[in-house]
């Protein structure tokens, strides 16, 4: 039987069974030269054992048979197909974070960069969230230390929806709030903190006004700046942690914990120079 892998693509939420490997699938799904196209994504290699998924999908209310569709896709690749889609959408929200084994950043032409091993940052013991909570209330309820100083931070949410959000919350606080907030809860969330504003996505005044609003209202938790395709346009070198493997990275969180996949200590020159 071929060496079959199960790969989750973020932000689309596509899960693919493939015999091409991570690098091969990245090139296979690439739209082409990074000079002309945008096609960044995150690839996650999911846990496998004896040719089967080594995890159980989270319940989705019966609108599809995720386990059955995945088994069929794996069987098709085992019989000789190079790739077979298991889930065509929403795979992120129904795949437990514990199923993640390796995570890669993928550039437009298919170049991949493997991130360092997952690191748990904080476990959430309390789950009671009220919309009127202030940032310091969020910290205390989530079991976190209250920051001495708060500065608006810029987060790029990749999934379950793509957002560019300014926030008075730290990454750990934002993860707790976004997976607990009444009426707008994310089952799971993946996001990165950005070093600078991204005026190619919205007028600079949108960022300036949002930062001013957060500073003038220290009790305000978040302010959405852009809703839509962000990951395909925001360069990786603008992520917090790109030049410092001890900071930032790709945050992933569910109701019970937040963790991070950080950049490797050294970023290969070839990947760094690759366009897109």
Image: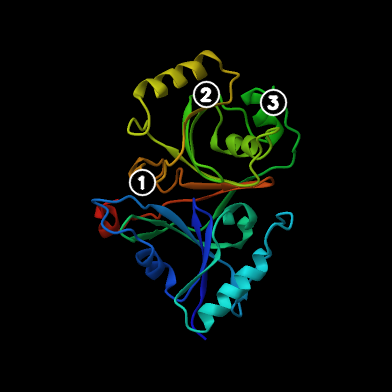
Is residue 202 left or right of 143 when viewed as pictured? left
Dot 2 or dot 3, earlier in sequence: 3
Please say if 200 is above or below 189.
above
* Neighbourhood count class around disc 2 (C-alpha, 10 Å): few under 14, some 14–19, many 20 upward: some
Distance from label 1 to label 3 (Cα)?
33 Å
- Quadrant of res 182: top right
Query: Where is mark 3, residue-wise?
Result: 131
Quadrant of the rendered structure where residue 219 is?
Answer: top right
Cα distance in 3D space between marks 2 and 3: 19 Å
Q: Name the residue tied to disc 2.
A: 150
Label 1: few (<14), some (14–19) or many (≥20) C-alpha neighbours in 10 Å: many
**For the point 61% across and 80% down, which residue is it?**
50
Location of residue 230 in the rendering, given as x and y in whole percent from the top left corner: 42, 41
User: Looking at the image, which residue is at 23% across and 51% down?
Assistant: 35
| Image: 159 above or below 7 | above
Residue 52: give x, y in percent of width and height: 62, 75
Q: Which residue is mark 1?
A: 236
Q: CA distance from mark 2 to mark 1?
A: 25 Å
The mark closer to the camera, 2 or 1, is 1
Q: Kindly check if marks 2 and 3 are in contact, taking CB atoms under 8 A apart as contact.
A: no
Nearer the camera: disc 2 or disc 3: 3
| Residue 143 % position (x, y) | 69, 36
Whole-percent x, y for residue 93 in the image: 62, 52
Question: Could you tell which of marks 1 and 3 lies nearer the N-terminus?
Answer: 3
């Amino acid at each position: 039987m071929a060496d079959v892998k199960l790969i989750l693509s973020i932000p689309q939420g596509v899960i693919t069974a493939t015999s091409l490997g991570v690098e091969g699938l990245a090139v296979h799904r690439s739209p082409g030269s990074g000079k002309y196209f945008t096609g960044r994504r995150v690839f996650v290699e999911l846990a496998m054992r004896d040719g089967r998924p080594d995890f159980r999908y989270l319940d989705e209310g019966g609108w599809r048979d995720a386990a059955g569709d995945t088994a069929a896709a794996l069987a098709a690749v085992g019989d000789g197909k190079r790739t077979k889609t298991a889930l065509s959408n929403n795979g992120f929200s129904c795949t437990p974070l514990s199923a993640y084994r390796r995570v890669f950043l993928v550039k437009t032409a298919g170049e991949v960069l493997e991130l360092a091993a997952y690191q748990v940052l904080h476990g959430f013991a309390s789950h009671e969230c009220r919309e009127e909570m202030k940032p310091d209330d969020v910290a205390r309820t989530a079991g976190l230390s209250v920051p001495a100083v708060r500065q608006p931070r810029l987060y790029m949410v990749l999934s379950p929806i793509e957002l560019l959000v300014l926030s008075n919350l730290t990454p750990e606080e934002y993860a707790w709030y976004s997976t607990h907030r009444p009426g707008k809860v994310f089952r799971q969330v993946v996001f990165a903190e950005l070093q600078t504003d991204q005026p190619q996505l919205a007028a600079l005044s949108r960022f300036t006004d949002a930062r001013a609003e957060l500073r003038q209202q220290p009790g305000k938790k978040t302010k959405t700046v852009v809703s839509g395709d962000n990951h395909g346009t925001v360069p990786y070198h603008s992520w917090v942690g790109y030049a410092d493997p001890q900071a930032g990275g790709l945050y992933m969180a569910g109701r019970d914990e937040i963790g991070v996949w950080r950049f490797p200590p050294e970023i290969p020159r070839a990947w760094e120079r690759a366009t897109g």
